[in-house]
Image (cartoon, rainbow, N blue to C red):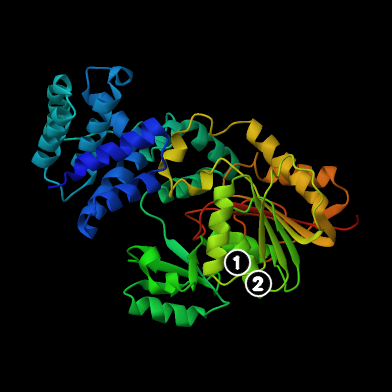
């Protein structure tokens, strides 16, 4: 019999030690062990639950352990986190199972010396009438929010400064639980209504997004790749925020479009649909294997106007055709997709001051390829004004041949920003965290 807790331990160790993405490591474990849907669900709950609550779990462990947290070896700490999570946040797991299975897991990994310690900590938690008390919000609101929602203080402080307490807490609440899975209808092959009908017949719950007619929210999908509608190229996975980014860019048939940081290609595919598969899309990336993925997906979707090539958007000075539309969806800190990749929040260099400089260099290098009257969109999947609004403001101040281009896609900003910028905020908007800014070239 497969030990699901042991699989969770291995996935968590892979994420922490090897820098693996939780979603990829988890999916690989499910496939390799051929888990049933029930076991896969339990494994996912354990892995994501621990990652989403790591700071809170450590806060609780510190209150029950005589050994300082920094001196607890990592394998032992991981097992403790799993045990505490099951005890306090999984109602269907009996206390005895949470404790005993944690001790067995320690022994399985030859942590005999830690087994007694793990047993003592977990049993002390089961005996306590009040399991834990959060920090005093009135004394230190940042620390309180950091512990309650398991988000590092630097990030909480950034969001409070940028968006205020109320919006910050809505963002923090959105970080727990699995976000909606959204697909884009391939309008070159089908309609939203036809796709929803076909998905329903395949046992998938699907409904239209109220914000974008060709965005479909999915539930109970199982393996997406196994769906006939997927194999037939009638959909691809793309968050609503990315679809709205293309809507702001508004590509048209016969346009020349340049996507400078294209992989994995979703915005190029959606642009091709806006263009009715007429015109040219130049999709660039620095990795050949990512370009191959774009090419394969384009083939599945019956899109034949995408041309790929290796190119460094920051430094490449090769001549390109002038684009009617140019898209700079730049590398970023990823603060807008923490709910999809919960481990992101714990990266030490997340607020690296060098990142906005890199992004700005990509934007400045790419603007050279915008035709007169053409539109340039700069976007990120993060929630950090240094990477977002400040780069957009700086660009306009230093490039007098561009003017603000109003974003009018039916969504209102909830933060103070100019009409050519839009910050999508999870917990407020039904999207990932995302930033869009648009500019029009007024002369060459």
Residue depicted at x 24% and y 59%:
37
Residue 292's place in the image compared with 76, above or below, is below
Which residue of the protein is positioned furthest toward the right in this rendering? 443
Disc 2, disc 1: CB below 8 Å?
Answer: yes
Q: In the rendered image, which residue does mark 1 sit on?
A: 270
Q: Is residue 333 left or right of residue 53?
A: right
In the rendering, at what x and y percent does residue 206 appear?
40, 73
Q: Is residue 417 left or right of residue 91?
A: right
Q: Is residue 433 left or right of residue 103?
A: right
In the rendering, at what x and y percent does residue 351 appear?
57, 33
Q: Is residue 137 visible?
A: no
In the rendering, at what x and y percent does residue 332 appear?
59, 42
Observer-nearest of 54 and 361: 361
Residue 307's place in the image compared with 128, above or below, is below
Please, what secondary structure does the residue beneath circle 1 have? helix
Q: How many marks?
A: 2
Observer-nearest of 422 and 48: 48
* Label of residue 274 in the image: 2
Q: Is residue 31 visible?
A: yes
Please, what secondary structure does the residue beneath circle 2 have? helix
């Amino acid at each position: 019999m497969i030990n699901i807790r042991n699989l969770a331990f291995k996935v968590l160790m892979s994420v922490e030690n090897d820098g693996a993405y939780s979603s990829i490591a988890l999916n690989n474990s499910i496939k390799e062990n051929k888990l049933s849907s029930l076991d896969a669900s339990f494994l996912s709950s354990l892995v994501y639950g621990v990652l989403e609550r790591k700071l809170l779990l450590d806060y609780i462990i510190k209150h029950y352990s005589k050994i300082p947290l920094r001196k607890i070896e990592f394998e032992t700490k991981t097992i403790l986190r799993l045990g505490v999570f099951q005890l306090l946040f999984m109602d269907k797991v009996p206390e005895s199972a949470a404790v005993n299975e944690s001790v067995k897991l320690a022994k399985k990994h030859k942590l005999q010396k830690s087994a007694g310690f793990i047993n003592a900590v977990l049993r002390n938690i089961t005996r306590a009438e009040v399991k834990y008390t959060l920090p005093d919000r009135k004394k230190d609101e940042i620390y309180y929010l950091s512990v309650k929602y398991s988000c590092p203080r630097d990030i909480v402080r950034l969001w409070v400064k940028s968006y205020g307490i109320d919006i910050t807490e809505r963002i923090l609440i959105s970080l727990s639980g699995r976000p909606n899975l959204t697909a884009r209808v391939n309008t070159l092959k089908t309609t939203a209504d036809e796709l929803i009908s076909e998905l329903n017949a395949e046992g998938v719950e699907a409904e239209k997004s109220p914000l974008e007619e060709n965005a479909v929210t999915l539930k109970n999908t199982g393996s997406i790749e196994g769906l006939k509608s997927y194999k037939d190229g009638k959909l691809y996975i793309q968050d609503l925020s990315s679809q709205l980014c293309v809507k702001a860019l508004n590509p048209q048939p016969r346009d020349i479009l340049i996507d400078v940081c294209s992989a994995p290609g979703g915005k190029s595919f959606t642009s091709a649909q806006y263009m009715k598969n007429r015109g040219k899309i130049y999709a660039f990336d620095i990795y050949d294997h990512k370009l191959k993925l774009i090419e394969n997906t384009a083939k599945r979707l019956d899109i034949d106007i995408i041309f790929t090539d290796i190119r460094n958007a920051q430094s490449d000075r090769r001549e390109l055709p002038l684009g009617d539309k140019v898209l700079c969806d730049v590398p970023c800190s990823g603060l807008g997709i923490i709910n999809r990749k919960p481990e992101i929040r714990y990266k030490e260099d997340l607020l690296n001051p060098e990142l906005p400089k890199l992004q700005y260099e990509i934007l400045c290098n790419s603007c050279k390829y915008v035709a007169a009257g053409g539109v340039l969109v700069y976007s990120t999947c993060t929630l950090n004004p240094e990477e977002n609004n400040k780069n957009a403001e700086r660009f306009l101040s230093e490039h007098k041949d561009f003017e603000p281009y109003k974003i009018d896609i039916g969504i209102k900003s909830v933060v103070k920003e100019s009409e050519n910028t839009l910050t999508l905020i999870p917990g407020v908007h039904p999207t990932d965290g995302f930033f869009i800014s648009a500019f029009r070239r007024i002369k060459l």
